[in-house]
Amino acid sequence: MRRIFFILVVLALISASAASSGGQRVRAERPATDPNAVLYWSQVAESTISVGRPPASSEVLNGLVHAAIYDATVSVEGRYEPFAVSIRRTGETSVDAAIAAAARGVLVWRVPGQAATIESAYTAFLAGIPDGTAKTNGIRLGQGVAGAYIALRSDDGFDNVVPWVQPTPGPGVFEPIPFNSTPVDIKLKQVRPLAFDDPARFRPEGPDSLTSRAYTRDFNETKALGRIDSTERTPEQTEVARFWSEQAMVLFNRNLRALALEHGLDTLETARMFAMVHVSAADSLVGCWEAKFHYLFWRPQTAIQNAADDGNPDTTADPSWLSLFPNPGYPDMPSGYNCYTAANMTAGEAFFGTDNVAFNVTNSAGTRSYTQFSGYIHDAIEGRILIGFHFRSADENGAWAGAKTADWVTHHEFHAVP
């Protein structure tokens, strides 16, 4: 994000009685459905952003919303440096109202098709906050944050229409499945990240040569384990593969809320954790898509079906080979899921200050329990091989890029005020 800090003086918005309060912060009552405003608006963001939208672009918007929520929160509460927008608070200000107005403003702008749902959630939420100066000032502050973010991101490339031109098919060249379809989220390759300017900042190394021993190893591993009717994949491995098939943004956001509840995080710390995780994940996916469409490396399904032409005597074609689930519509290298996973887990480690945090991840396939963030990264790498979506090198390079992105973001942003 272009680092522009908005210092908005809101004295004109504060009544005389509020000004006489000495700048007291007010924590208004919250809706009984959620223990803090961040969790409420994170769920609203998740449910509205994900409608009809692929996981990667969903998370880019999710990162934007949570950055705005964080900046609204620290504008009221202090203690931490803002990410991109700072509003000067004067007088009594409801942090809950500020969060609601900031989230609502960004969501209505970026997800206009869900405006009615967002407005309904906003009305219901505000009804749980007592009327008065604190509520009014909070709404105005949050609106200021939302407006600043809209100005900052109006030229970020997210709304650009990026045409797809299929490269000449051949060994190693990505072809959408089905052929001649348009790749998913191709526009992300040129979107400006949230925390820095260059999408290629953490571009990983490219794919191995098709005749290399490393490629041969990866090819044969995915061919054996990722086939839809594999006899080498155990029933337990099949369950692992199914576990990593849910829409990633929805899966992670839901389980991040559970983690915040389990650790009893207050509004400010919830806002900070969610911003650290989602900004890191959003930028990792922008970088991942830049790399995907830079390398344009074929998916395992295409590679295995066409191995007779790859020049490698140690790979054998199987024209009938299909992955366990239908292939996503974007190139193999690097794995987007692993960019995302490693960014999430690395940012979580940075927030807690340790890898050794116990947590559960639950979806329709069940619940998996972990004692370390790094353990989930390992399982995600294996899961995307078992599902037949990636070669191991794509998963490992994705995890590297996601971790590097999150390391950079968490070392440069979201620090305590000196």
Image: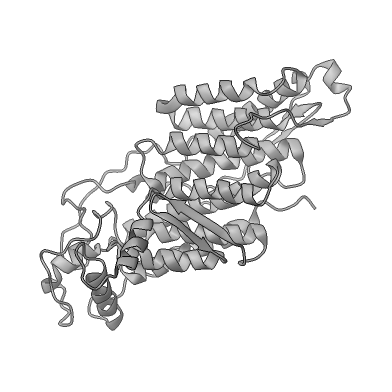
Q: Is residue 230 above or below residue 49?
A: below
* Percent position of residue 220, x then y: 24, 76
* Percent position of residue 196, x then y: 55, 52
Q: Is 20 left, or right, of 171 in this rendering? A: right
Q: Is 96 left, or right, of 181 in this rendering? A: right
Q: Is residue 355 above or below residue 33?
A: below
Residue 411 visible, this orientation = no
Residue 353 visible, this orientation = yes
Where residue 358 sits, quadrant-wise, is bottom right
The structure's colour scheme is one colour
Where residue 336 sits, quadrant-wise, is bottom left
Q: Nearer the viewer, residue 416 or 134?
A: 134
Write the residue at 47% across / 41% down.
Answer: 61
Q: Is residue 35 above or below residue 371?
A: above
Question: How many numbered discs?
Answer: 0
Q: Nearer the viewer, residue 58 or 124?
A: 124
Q: Is 273 left, or right, of 323 in this rendering? A: right
* Percent position of residue 90, x then y: 80, 28
Q: Nearer the viewer, residue 410 or 253?
A: 253
Q: Is 327 left, or right, of 334 in this rendering? A: left
Write the residue at 18% across / 82% down.
Answer: 314
* Percent position of residue 389, x then y: 29, 61
